[in-house]
Every structure is written in structure tokens, then in C-alpha cells.
Amino acid sequence: MNFIGSQTAQKLRGGYYTPPDLAEFLVRWVTHKNPKKILEPSCGDGVFFKPISDLIDDSHVTGFELDPIEAEKASKVARQVGLRQYSVNDDDFLGWAFDALREKTVQFDAVLGNPPFVRYQYLPPLFQGRAEAIFNELRCKFTKHTNAWVPFILASFALLRPGGRLAMVVPAEIIHVTHAQSLRSYLGDHASRLVVIDPEELWFPGTLQGAVLLLAERKANARAHGEGLGMYPVRGRGFLKKNPEDIFRAPQSINGKTVEGKWTRALLNPSTRSLLDGLIEAGVARKFDDVADVDVGIVTGANKFFLVEDVTVEQFSLQKWAHPMFGRSEHCPGVVYDDRQHRANALKGNPTNFIWFQDRSVEKSRPGKRYIERGESESLHTRYKCRIRKPWYSVPSVYATEVGMLKRSHDTPRLILNQLRAYTTDTAYRIRLKEGTADQLVYGFINGLTALSAELEGRHYGGGVLELVPSEIEKLLVPPPMKIKPKIAALDKAVRTLPMDAVLEQQTRLTLGNMGLSKTDQIELLSGWKKLRDRRHRVSSTAN
Ligand SMILES: C[S@@+](CC[C@H](N)C(=O)[O-])C[C@H]1O[C@@H](n2cnc3c(N)ncnc32)[C@H](O)[C@@H]1O
């Protein structure tokens, strides 16, 4: 959890500046349209001003910069580089943009910049309100999970004239985060073409936040054809020497599915995308939702009270109420959770007991009462999840399923065959079968196709960990369970002892290969997965 006090001032205003070579490249791309009126919505110390002055005649630049010292620096740069017509406003862009959008008073030929990365919760209430108003004005779905860069791009793009261009450095998470869906949809609807330049390295190491370049051209009119999105992967800075217009035209763009949802599919080679479509059509790839249901795990409201080690069970004589549970990936190094694994976890001193008081009868027992009083002395009964239920210590929705799934994974998600029928907390999901056996589902889940679809559907944050929420799990592609011949013990051993790349290669052969998928297609799926997995590890080493 980040607290506002621990955020540096630079971080709180999202103040990481664009290197001049990237700024120049973006300016070169917009010059193609011979722009005159240019917007820089968060201009920092004005890094875009020199290339604008060098490359565009008769430009009129409107800049915003919240920080008055930086705004002053930007004005000075504007003068020094010879910009004749400019204004740098030391004011909030969002408030101004909202009025401009509503009153339709102004349109720009080009927008350049690098919007601030500040989580909505850290924005002052006034700016929060303005951010929301921009979403509403543009009829975009608003969420409090948003980040300042989203309304900045939305408003800037909406202020472009038909055919105008937006060229910005934007967080790499624009490709996949759920909270940016309305921005992606808005751009998909209103851009004639979109290209994301996706670097292999981190351009802003200080922020630990992956960044990409977004090139977006506004449609000439609402009914004009939209070509969709193209992805242009780059390594190093060599691409900056190329003509940006050639780069904008280079990638094969994709429409439909890709532009409607996350943009992750565009990161794949066209051949991998058509392989995926083909497998769905041929029935080799089924949606997880067709074969199983996903339920969230048990929400205790106070894990340190309800999930305890053996010593606590003994110390408070809680044996009657203690049930086996697991919840962390280190508690399940394989794909089977059995008595042996459970005892090994307990021996290590892990909290392997779930304390389940079903009703008030526990208060009649002295040890039970004593433990509950201890929880109350720590005010646990006043916590939100606890205080809304009666009695506060009786956790609802307690049941175990034959199959579980951990929410987070490093390489690829796996299902756990819960032979012990242990309970799981909300760090895991409870999976209920709709077809096939538990062994078939668990065994068939580890393969290149499912791993690749997890990269396409999931989200990632700190440390590059992949996380899937139930609606994303439902979309995962799995081989039909009935066609799987499971050898669970062998898979369990492989997952415990081999690197995941090797396990996936082996399992792709044993599942999809046995169903007739060619070696070439197996390799295509595995390399697609590896590409996205490696990219995830690279771009999201953020601790924000
Ligand atoms: C990522 S920096 C980029 C600066 C410059 N555009 C560049 O590319 O180097 C974002 C800038 O936005 C400014 N900023 C933050 N919130 C703002 C707001 N509401 N209105 C205008 N500028 C803002 C920050 O002070 C910071 O200088």
C-alpha cells in the first residue's frame, strides 16, 4: 500500500520528463499535417518547444503546466528557442479542457506531450471532479481506478480537429489496464489509425514505469473508416532515425476484437493471431467459462485472526474450529494440494489453519470465547467486513472446491487439484467443473494456448506479476477437458522441478499435440506466450 506522505513531490505531480530525442521524433510525426495550432497539455520545462520551433513554421503553441516554477522555465525555453506565438498557463489543464470541450471554442491541429502519471486517489478533490467531468462530457465510462494520464489523453484527443494528430509518451499500461478501457474505446472509435511504438527497454528507469509512444490521428469525419491499431516494437533508439510517417504506416493494423478490448493482441505476430482465431473456430480452444465456473475465495475480513499457524491453534486450544487452508503460491509449488503438502507447509510455520466459528455456540466454550475476546481487544469486530455480519466472527460463504486457482502468478497461472479439500482465502479462486473431471481440467490447463490467453486477458503490476480476475479467467482459452488424458502426478512433479518454459513445452505437446496440433503451431503459441511474458516482466517492474 502506498501512502500519500511517502510519495515524492515529483511523483505526485507525475513529473518525469521526455528525453529530447523522443520529443523531436514525435514533433516530426505531426509535421506531416502541417499543423499550426499546437497543444502541450502538461509541458513541464518545455522539452517539446525547441523541436516545434525548429520544425514548424508559424506555430501557435498553447501550453499548460501546473507547477509555476516549471511553467516559468517552459516560458523561458519558449522565448529562447524563438517561438513567436505561445502561451504557457500555470494552471490545471483538466479544468480548462473541460470548459473548452463543452463550449467547443477551440480545436488544435496537433497535440504533443507526456501526461502526468498520478493515481486518481492522489489528485486533489477539485481535479478529481474535473477528471470525472471530462469522462462524462465525452460519454466515456468513468472509474475511480483511473489515473491522470487517462483524462489528459481523452481531453487532448477530443480537442483535435478532424484529421489532427496526437503524439505522446504514455504509460505502457495503456495497452492492458481495465481502467483505460474507455480511453481505448474512444480512440478506437474516433481515430483513423493508431500506432503504439513499444520499446524493449524502460525509457524512464527512475519511475520504473514502462512507457510507449502513442501516435493517433483523428478521423476526418465521424463516418470515416477507422483502420484500427498497429503495434511497432523497437529495440534501442535506432528507430528515431527513421521517418516517423513510415513507422506510422508500417504495422499491419487490426480492428474489431483488438480495438474493442485490451490492446494486448496487437503485440502478437499476425500469424499467432490467426492461429488463435483458427483454434477457436476449430473447437480446439474452448472458453474457460464453457467448462468451469469461477468463484472468489473466502473473505475473512481479518486474516491474521482467522488464518493461523499450528502454534496458535495449540496455544488457544482451537482444534475444534481449525480447518486446513492454503492461499499462497509458495504453499502450492506443484498442482496438487494434498495431506503431504499441507503437513510440509505446517512444519514451516505457515498459517495453514482456517478458524471457522459457524455460530454463537462457540461462546459457550471457554477457549473459543477467549479467542474471540482477543480479537475484540484488537478491535477486529469493528472492521468493515466483520461488523456487517452477525456474529462478527462467523465468516460466510465457507466451502471448498475440488479445484482452486491462485490469483497471481509469475510465469503462467495454474490450477490446483485440491485433494485435501482445503479452504482457500481470497488470494485464490474456487473453480467448479461444468464438464470433464478435475484431473482433466487441472492437467489440461497448463499448455501454450492457455498460457498465451492468460497474457492476453490478464493484468500486471508490481514486479511483473500476472493477475487474473474472474471475468478474465472466464475468457481464457483451454483445450476441451474431455479430450485430455491426465497424468497428474507426473505434471505435479514437472511443475515442482522444471522451469515453467520446459513444463509448458512438454504439456503443449502432451495436450494440444496429442489432439493433432502441429509442432509448428505449438512453437507459435509458446513463442507468443514467451514474448508477452517477457514483455510483462520488463515493463511492469513498478513499485507504484
Ligand atoms: C510526465 S511530465 C511531462 C512534462 C513534459 N510534457 C515532458 O514531456 O517532459 C508531466 C507534467 O505534468 C504536470 N502536471 C501535473 N498535473 C497537471 C495538471 N493538472 N495540469 C497541467 N499540468 C500538470 C507536472 O507538473 C509535470 O510537469
Image (tube, rainbow, N blue to C red):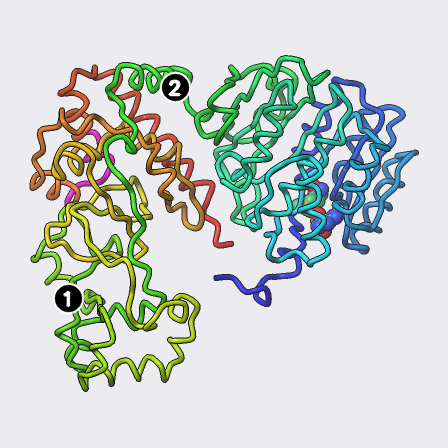
Rendering quarter of residue 13: bottom right
* Of 481 and 537, the residue lying toward us: 481
Instruction: Tell me, yes or no, whether the highlighted magenta stretch contains residue 501.
Output: yes
| Magenta highlight range | 497-505
In the displayed structure, 368 sits above or below 162; it is below
Residue 121 location (% of width, % of height) = 59, 56
Rendering quarter of residue 79: top right
Asked which secondary structure carries label 1, the reply is helix
For badge 2, the amino acid type reads Arg
Residue at 16%, 26% (x, y): give it.
Answer: 511
In the drawing, what numbered circle is on residue 24?
Answer: none
10 Å crowding of disc 1: few (<14), some (14-19), many (20+) = some
Distance from label 2 to label 1 (Cα)?
A: 45 Å
Residue indicated by mark 2 = 273
10 Å crowding of disc 2: few (<14), some (14-19), many (20+) = some
Residue 246 location (% of width, % of height) = 62, 15
Rendering quarter of residue 525: top left
* Of 197 and 238, the residue lying toward us: 197
Residue at 13%, 73% (x, y): give it.
Answer: 320
239 sits left or right of 275 in the view? right
Residue 45 location (% of width, % of height) = 76, 46
For badge 1, the amino acid type reads Ala
Dominant SS type (magenta): helix
Residue indicated by mark 1 = 346
